[in-house]
Amino acid sequence: MTTDDKRISPEDIRNKLNEITGSVGDELESTKGTAITVGAIALGVLVVAVFLIGRRRGKRLATIVEIRRV
């Protein structure tokens, strides 16, 4: 087999690259909506968790001052 049998042209490279990126682009579009939904749910859970942890810590560190008349 010699190297003169078939040369790879720049057009061959472009066609193959378009073929590869085209299939990846289709998969990306189909999973983008799912990824955004999962990200939004994760962010919501994180915000609720931080709120509950902060509320608990605020109750624990709060000073209660009792004033009595003698």
Image (cartoon, rainbow, N blue to C red):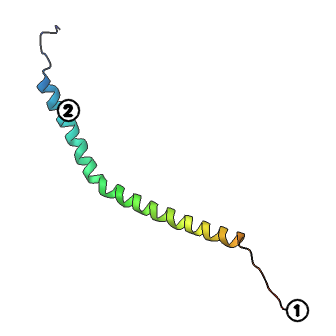
In the image, residue 48 sits, relative to residue 24, either above or below, namely below
Residue 8: image location, x then y, percent: 15, 19
Of the 4 image quadrants, the one containing the C terminus is: bottom right
Q: Nearer the viewer, residue 10 or 61?
A: 61
Residue located farthest toward the right when viewing the structure as drawn: 70
Q: Nearer the viewer, residue 64 or 14?
A: 64
State the residue position of label 2: 17
Residue located farthest toward the front when viewing the structure as drawn: 70
- Circle on res. 56: none
Residue type of the residue flagged with mark 2: Leu
Badge 2 density bin: few <14, some 14–19, many ≥20, Cα 10 Å: few
Q: Is residue 55 left or right of residue 43?
A: right
Of the 4 image quadrants, the one containing the N terminus is: top left
State the residue position of label 1: 70
Residue type of the residue flagged with mark 1: Val
How far apart are the two marked residues, 1 and 2, measured between alpha carbons?
88 Å
In the image, residue 61 sits, relative to residue 35, either above or below, namely below
Q: Are marks 1 and 2 in contact (CB under 8 Å)?
A: no
Q: Which of the two discs, 1 and 2, sits closer to the camera?
A: 1
In the image, residue 49 sits, relative to residue 3, either above or below, namely below
Q: Is residue 5 left or right of residue 65?
A: left
